[in-house]
Image (cartoon, rainbow, N blue to C red):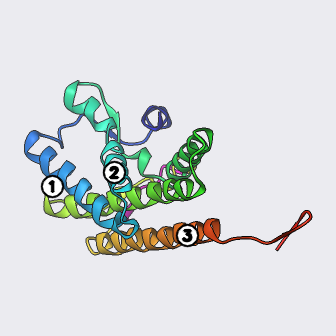
Amino acid sequence: MFSAIGFLHGLPHGNGSEYTIFFLIPEIGGHILFAVVAILPFLDLELIFLSAVIAVFIDMDHLLGILTTLPYVGRPNHSILFILVSISILVYLTRRMKLSRSSQIKVAFVVPVAILSHISFDILAAYVIFGGGSFTFPLFYPFSSTLIAFQLYSFVILEAAAFGLAIVGSLFVKRDRKEAKAPSTSIGKLTI
């Protein structure tokens, strides 16, 4: 969806030539590795798997360029709005599925952690795998199509931010579980 909107909005697009099998395997492996490392503070295998899937699926728009000659739009899914929309949709779905509050918190944190780790690896890959210079993203898309450039060292900062966000999320989950287990004393309708 974001790629289609980006194509109409005029974001730069390509035809998949950057992704050959030679580049695709380390690209997917790198995204999985960075996502797994970033989400480790949760110590939750399902969340580790979900984070890896999200980190890889963000680039699904590139499959159009790899498998067809159709153009794809470069990186509208690497925006702040995409993170917010994704969190909203996934939290809504967890509520509809009546998952626990702890599960809802995990899902709310896994999206930004996975996307930050994804962008982190994209930056590293731009320098190491693709041998280019800085890597750019339309972070404020669709409000602005301006591409924001990142230097090589930025990958460390973004991966650390993803890891730190996962630590914060795991602390929220621990607090929620502790509050859920704590007995409450009720007097009439007043709960103490």
CA gap between label 3 and label 2 equals 22 Å
Instruction: Tell me the magenta residue range.
Output: 144-149
Earlier in the chain: of badge 2 and badge 1, it is 2
Pinpoint residue 121: horizontal percent, then vertical percent: 27, 60
Q: Residue at x 18, y 59 (%)?
A: 132
How far is mark 3 from mark 1, CA to CA?
38 Å
Tell me where residue 103 appears, x and y as whole percent: 52, 54
**Image coordinates for residue 127, horizontal then vertical, percent:** 18, 63
Indicate the amino acid at tag 1: Phe
Residue toward you, 77 or 164: 164
Gap in Å between the C-alphas at discs 2 and 1?
19 Å
Instruction: Report the predominant secondary structure element of the magenta stretch.
Output: loop
Identify the residue at horizontal 69%, vertical 71% (top origin). Answer: 183
- Three-letter residue code for mark 2: Ala
Which mark is drawn over residue 130? Answer: 1
Dot 2 alpha-carbon crowd within 10 angstroms: few under 14, some 14 to 19, many 20 or more: many
SS for dot 3: helix
Disc 3 marks which residue?
172
| Residue identifier under label 2 | 55
- Dot placed on the residue nearer the N-terminal end, 3 or 2: 2
**Considering only vertical position in the picture, is 14 above or below 37?**
above
